[in-house]
Amino acid sequence: YNGHLPGHWSWFPVGTFAANFSASIISIAMIAIDYVFGMSGNPHSFWVYGTCRAIKTGFAGSLSTVSTFSEEIYGFMELKAPKAFYSYYYTLFTIGMSCVCSVAVYAMIV
């Protein structure tokens, strides 16, 4: 069970999407915070940089599920048309939402 939606959207793996989306938002937030504190000349910027890098690489890196994402895309591609197009829908939706929301988060912080 991967948190599938009911009805027509039952093919959409919500769990993997939520994990990857959260990881991208956390990662870009840490990049923005590191940029803001790094440019401010704060004497504690070393610790801010280390903490942001640890959260970005450790927490967000372990939260993202690239292997599950690629396995689900491969599984969608093995289906017969028109369900094979789910792989394209899912990929474009995941990347598109992550990019748009990451730009918004970065713009709000910086």
Image (spheres, rainbow, N blue to C red):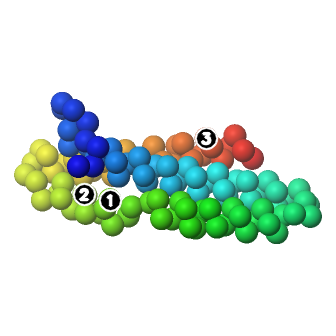
Q: Is residue 42 above or below residue 81?
A: below
Left or right: 74 in relation to 108:
left
Where does label 3 land, which residue? 104
Residue at 55% from the left image edge and 49% from the top image edge: 25
| Callout 2 touching callout 3 (CB < 8 Å) | no
Disc 1 residue type (three-letter)? Phe
Which residue type carries mark 3? Ala
**Mark 2 against mark 3, which lies toward the viewer?**
2
Q: CA distance from mark 2 to mark 3?
A: 27 Å
Determine crowd level at label 3: few under 14, some 14-19, many 20+ residues with C-alpha closer than 10 A.
few
Task: Give left or right: position of 30 versus 64.
Answer: right
Asked if labels 3 and 1 touch by Cβ distance under 8 angstroms, the answer is no
Q: Position of residue 87 (x, y in %)?
A: 24, 52
The relative height of residue 96 versus residue 74 in the rendered view (above or below) is: above
Element at badge 2? helix
Marks 2/1: CA–CA distance: 5 Å
The residue under label 2 is 72
Residue shown at 12% from the left, 44% from the top: 82
Q: Which residue is mark 1?
A: 69
Q: CA distance from mark 1 to mark 3?
A: 23 Å
Hey, which quadrant is residue 48 in on the image?
A: bottom right
Image coords of residue 71 (percent x, y):
25, 63
Q: Can the viewer see residue 35 in this picture?
A: yes
SS assignment at label 3: helix
Please tell me which of labels 1 and 3 falls first in the chain. Answer: 1
> The disc labelled 2 sits on which kind of residue?
Glu
Q: Looking at the image, do the residues carrying marks 2 and 1 touch, with CB atoms under 8 Å apart?
A: yes
Helix, strand or loop at label 1? It is helix
Instruction: Using the rendered image of the protein, determine whether residue 96 is visible from the camera's viewpoint.
Output: no
Could you tell me residue 83's position as x and y percent? 14, 46
Which of the marked residues, 2 or 3, is nearer the chain's N terminus? 2
At 69% from the left and 40% from the top, the residue drawn is 108
